[in-house]
Image (cartoon, coloured by chain):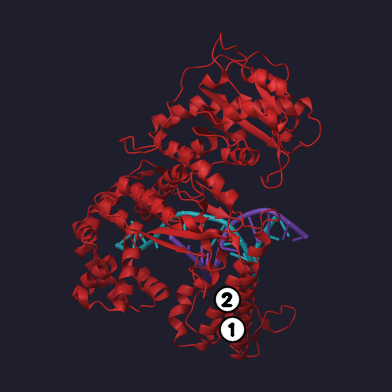
Chain colours: A red, B purple, C cyan
Amino acid sequence: MSDTGDGWCYRPFKPVLQPFPLMPASQTHPHLKDGTYQLITSGKELESALRWCSPSGGKSLEQSPIFGLDCETTGLDPHIHTIRLIQLAVPDQPVMLIDLPQIAPCDRHPLQQLLSSPVLKITHNGKFDWQFLAQAGLQPAPPFFDTQLAYRVLTAGLKTILSLQTLAQKLLNIELDKTQQVSDWSKPLTSKQLQYAALDAAILLKLYPILIKKLERSHLLKIAQLEFHCMPAVAQMELNGMLLDLSRWKSLGAKLESDRDAALQQLSQLRIAGNAQMSLLPEMTDTINPNSPQQVLAALQVLGMPVNSTNQKELVPLAKQYPVIRALLDYRHLSKITATFADSLPKHIHPVTARIHPTYYQLGARSGRFSCRNPPLQTIPRDAAARTCFVAAPGYQIVQADYSQIELRIVARLSGDAQMQRAYRKGEDLHRLTAALVTGNAIDAVSEEDRRLAKAINFGLIYGMGAAKLQSYAEMKYGVTLSLEEAKAFRKRFFEAYTGVAEWHETIKRSYIRGTKESRTLAGRRRRWADKPRLAELLNHPVQGLNADITKLALVKLNKVLTETGAKLICTVHDEILLECPVVEAKHISYLLRRCMVAAARKFLRPIPVVVDIKVSSSWGGDEA
DNA sequence: TCAGAGTGCGCC
DNA sequence: AAACGGCGCACGCTGA
């Protein structure tokens, strides 16, 4: 699909706003007049139901503008469980309940045709239905309208429950009884189950016009459509999963565990508090649990160390002076990695696919970013030792692409800062430039340490970090020691050098003072606050949110161009996209990936140039040694 | 005993 | 006046 020229380059659907008449009265549900259904249990019934109007008569279902789509399944895992019932709710018709297991695969063609037609499909958490339908060979095609995503787009930032039940109650004032949801869908279906299933799909048709109006009134229809178009990509990404080299991972885990134990050994030998030893054995008396912040803090204070907390921020500056603190930090790090990653990842290897399939929530973060869990692939340690364990299947390669300094480029775009814009247009290194500007050195004379300092300054100060925090942030993340006075001075010079950024901050500060309770990205995404936002949140959302908008647009573009290839989307981490593709296609896929990502970002960043770094290798962390 | 808030830290 | 944001998970601890 080519660029429509209106700022988006996927096909928008036309909202269908004409009201549809209520269906025949149902005796079984007092609140709804349209709970009637038609149970379809054979190929013959399916065929006649899907063209209930003769060709000479009225329109066929495919010409119907919309239908509500829902599935009941035998469980939650699309690699293991299967569809029991497909519900299609069409305006003016009884809900069609298709008992899929009873329809022979060769008789499913009319259904396949319907689902792959460009009719608007209304779903609630359609990612779930998409995955089960795809696994059944019935992959539904866009356009989609997802009531859950729509409601999240409308309420982003607020604590809101997103169940269909809640939406029905809030938007339609209908109480849905969900007790049947967890009933046994593998046995012959009861009329209660059928009634429940029909109602779920019928409700979607009712929610749709209400949500459309709300989205339009809030100028959020485009963002919602971006999310809807993104949904199939996310659904497919979850199905694809990632391949973990288990033996490699286990030997890494073993090494980390022995390193951890060595750090603990060192810690106990240092005898940090009288008789008390650091020990992992809680049944021993007189021991300190090194995993207990409380106990560790007490022990450090007994030793007379000037700490009020045991977090990294406090400890890192002391590590050079006290070997015991160094050992504690080493232990903490290794303990964290082994507990959170080494031990847990193998548990997530899927029994059927032998791959890892996390759950991605495309609106999991208030900013519009993805969140990811079970396992959180977005937080895998970035060192090569860990990431080389995520490998391509035999005959495949991993194509990894990430935006270079996307958040800083967004700041340059949003603030219009002349200095930043010029630097980016000339292809300069912005961290080097910042280093030169705050230290007063020539740009060619910037040392590596200065550049690390500048990174801390750039990433910290754009979101309004104060001098004290900059000081500890530079120390902790970049190993650069600053006095508070230096931190203050650098902060001052940063805003003197980047006056556009200072003005941009001022603009946001004014809306903050006026008491604004919402923020918009350049693409129109909105974040709301129930109470007064913090200034830093208002500074952050336009940047982090636009990053999310851009990455999602890239995914949408990508999904379109990958269909004819052997490439699979396997992971996304905020400004990064991972594909797995046959070795012979790697070069072509790299080209497509870069093109999609650059096009998506350019849409919003122009005139700031966009840079996408791409690596092709046998693993996420590059080619193994 | 167990849910839940709190601390701390992995990532971007 | 001063203020960096967004996540998920493991852990120890608290309190009903």
Residue A468 appears in the figure: yes
Q: Secondary structure at mark 1?
A: helix
Pointer 2 indicates a residue of which chain? A
Query: Closest to the observer: A75 or A305?
Result: A75
Q: Which mark is residue A294?
A: none
- On the image, the x and y values in percent for residue A50 come to 62, 20
What residue is shown with label 2? Answer: A334
Query: Closest to the observer: A249 or A326?
Result: A249
Decide which of tag 1 and tag 2 comes sooner along the chain. Answer: 1
C-alpha separation, residue under disc 1 versus residue under disc 2: 8 Å
Does the residue at mark 1 contact the one at mark 2 (Cβ under 8 Å)? Answer: yes
**Residue, x 55% and y 31% (percent of image)?**
A116
What residue is shown with label 1? Answer: A263
Crowding near the residue tagged with mark 1, few <14, some 14–19, many ≥20 C-alpha atoms within 10 Å: many
Inspect the image, locate mark 1, and give the three-letter code of the amino acid beneath it. Answer: Ala
Q: Which residue sits furthest right?
A: A187
- On the image, the x and y values in percent for residue A433 come to 23, 68
- Left/right of residue A317 with respect to residue A582 in the rendered view: left
Inspect the image, locate mark 2, and give the three-letter code of the amino acid beneath it. Answer: Leu
Q: Which residue sits furthest front?
A: A584
Q: Secondary structure at mark 2?
A: helix
- Left/right of residue A224 with respect to residue A524 in the rendered view: right
Q: Are marks 1 and 2 on the same chain?
A: yes
Q: Quadrant of the N terminus of chain A?
A: top left
